[in-house]
């Protein structure tokens, strides 16, 4: 079902308890949804519970509450305020004010500096105990009316038992009414049929057969690279060519065999070059750039998407990078000194993501064409449209893992390994005759 009720839009944002320091309240306000922080009778770290484990709201703190508190401590600012840079400004020397015991926010009986006073203040000292809220069962239209009556940009959402569910802002409601709510996380894959995107259950873009073809295509690259190694090895030494075609040279890492290590590196290079100079690299770039545009909240146009980075931190290439580094370390560990081992382990810890990004930019992606970018935008629009209609869709099928795409791609890869592996065995047999 689409977004229709306020409770569906309740977001888990930072909250505080009554005894929270004012500094923490201010910091949570910075990250809040609409400039309002809820004060609860209890706060738990459990993010899986929409009701904060039966927490009750006892107050709210807004930016205006912070302003009133600081004015009482620092006093009114008498210096002129700059408006568009036309007024004179100067550095204001803040007085070392204390707080009188009779003050509504008095903390101590001895004069203190403003910093000390701020450090001792708590959320209970400035919160509004009378809390306007939006019932979870309210329609989105009624939620907007509640914002107008309360005069706030965000309000807490309470369920039927008056338990805290989260915060909702006017922007949340308008975004839902206009059909622009983004999924929390978007992933995707490049396929020969175009870009495929998903948020875990719903999908958009290329059909599932495209994912299968993607795995099949990548496995074909693997065996084409093996053929390239064969021709290079055969040119140098015919016996090496036979070993390369059978997979006994160039497909395994052996620290004791320098020749095998060289041809293994050559096979990897050929594989990466095949990625770079085939259309799948452009589609891969379009997929990444489209996801970047969605995550940054940009209009999905060719102009905007084309300006996005081609590398993405969640790309599987980064996993390939760390696997390659670990494989190299494990292969050569017996022949390396402890100093080199520590250096390589440090590279795994600090540089694997940068290494993966570099591989993405140099090999597994290339500048996407307009048609490829349009494929990504089409997939994004289809996913967004499906998400607005079914934002809480949950697959009850035991095969729901197929919605993530990896299983389809893996099936294609295994099929390709069997198919192309059999062809190579036949080729090796006839060449050996």
Image: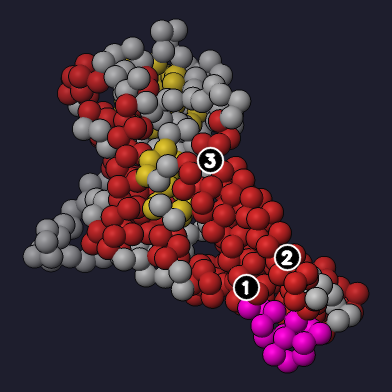
- Which residues are drawn in magenta? 228-241
The one of 147 and 421 positioned closer to us in this rendering: 421
Give the quadrant of the N terminus.
Answer: top left
Question: Regarding mark 3 in the picture, which secondary structure is present there?
Answer: helix
Find out whether residue 9 is within the magenta segment. Answer: no
Q: Which residue is mark 3?
A: 404
Whether residue 403 is visible: yes
Quick one: label 1 or label 2, which is nearer the N terminus? 1
The relative height of residue 318 versus residue 173 in the rendered view (above or below) is below
Q: Which mark is residue 426?
A: 2
The reply to whether discs 3 and 1 touch (Cβ–Cβ < 8 Å) is: no
Q: Position of 143 compared to 326: left or right? A: left
Mark 2 and mark 3: span between their CA atoms?
A: 35 Å
Q: Residue at x 53, y 43 (%)?
A: 405
Whether residue 346 is visible: no
Quick one: label 2 or label 3, which is nearer the N terminus? 3
Badge 2: few (under 14), some or many (20 or more) residues near its Cα, within 10 Å? few
Q: How many marks?
A: 3
Mark 1 and mark 2: span between their CA atoms?
A: 17 Å
Q: Which mark is residue 225?
A: 1
Looking at the image, what colour scheme do you see? secondary structure
Residue 69 coordinates in the image, percent (x, y):
33, 38
Badge 3: few (under 14), some or many (20 or more) residues near its Cα, within 10 Å? some
Residue 408 coordinates in the image, percent (x, y):
56, 43
Find out whether residue 235 is within the magenta segment. Answer: yes
């Amino acid at each position: 079902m689409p977004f229709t009720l306020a409770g569906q839009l309740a977001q888990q944002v930072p909250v505080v308890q009554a005894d929270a320091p004012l500094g923490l309240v201010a910091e949570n306000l910075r990250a809040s949804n609409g400039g309002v922080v809820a004060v609860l009778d209890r706060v738990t770290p459990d993010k899986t519970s929409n009701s904060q484990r039966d927490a009750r709201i006892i107050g709210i703190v807004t930016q205006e509450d912070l302003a009133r508190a600081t004015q009482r401590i620092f006093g009114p600012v008498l210096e002129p305020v700059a408006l568009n840079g036309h007024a004179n400004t100067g550095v204001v020397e803040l007085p070392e004010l204390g707080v009188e015991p009779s003050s509504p926010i008095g903390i101590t009986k001895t004069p203190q500096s403003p910093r000390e006073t701020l450090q001792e203040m708590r959320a209970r000292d400035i919160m509004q105990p009378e809390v306007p809220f939006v019932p979870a069962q309210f329609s989105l239209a009624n939620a907007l009316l509640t914002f107008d009556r309360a005069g706030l940009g965000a309000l807490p959402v309470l369920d039927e038992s008056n338990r805290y569910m989260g915060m909702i802002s006017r922007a949340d409601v308008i975004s839902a009414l206009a059909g622009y709510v983004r999924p929390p996380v978007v992933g995707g894959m490049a396929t020969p049929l175009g870009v495929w995107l998903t948020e875990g259950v719903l999908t958009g873009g290329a059909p599932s057969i495209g994912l299968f073809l993607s795995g099949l295509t990548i496995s074909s690259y693997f065996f084409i690279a093996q053929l390239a190694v064969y021709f290079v090895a055969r040119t140098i030494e015919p016996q090496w060519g036979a070993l390369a075609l059978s997979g006994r040279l160039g497909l395994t890492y052996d620290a004791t065999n320098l020749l095998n290590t060289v041809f293994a590196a050559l096979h990897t290079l050929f594989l990466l070059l095949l990625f770079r100079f085939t259309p799948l690299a452009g589609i891969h770039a379009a997929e990444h750039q489209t996801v970047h545009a969605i995550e940054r909240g940009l209009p999905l146009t060719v102009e905007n998407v084309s300006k996005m980075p081609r590398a993405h931190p969640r790309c599987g290439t980064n996993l390939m990078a760390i696997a390659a580094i670990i494989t190299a370390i494990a292969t050569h560990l017996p022949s390396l000194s402890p100093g080199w081992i520590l250096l390589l382990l440090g590279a795994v810890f600090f540089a694997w993501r940068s290494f993966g990004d570099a591989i993405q930019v140099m090999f597994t992606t290339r500048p996407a064409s307009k048609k490829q970018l349009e494929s990504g935008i089409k997939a994004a629009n289809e996913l967004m449209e499906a998400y607005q209609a079914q934002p809480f869709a949950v697959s009850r099928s035991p095969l729901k893992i197929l919605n993530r795409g990896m299983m389809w791609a893996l099936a294609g890869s295994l099929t390709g390994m069997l198919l192309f592996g059999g062809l190579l065995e036949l080729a090796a047999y006839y060449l050996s005759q």
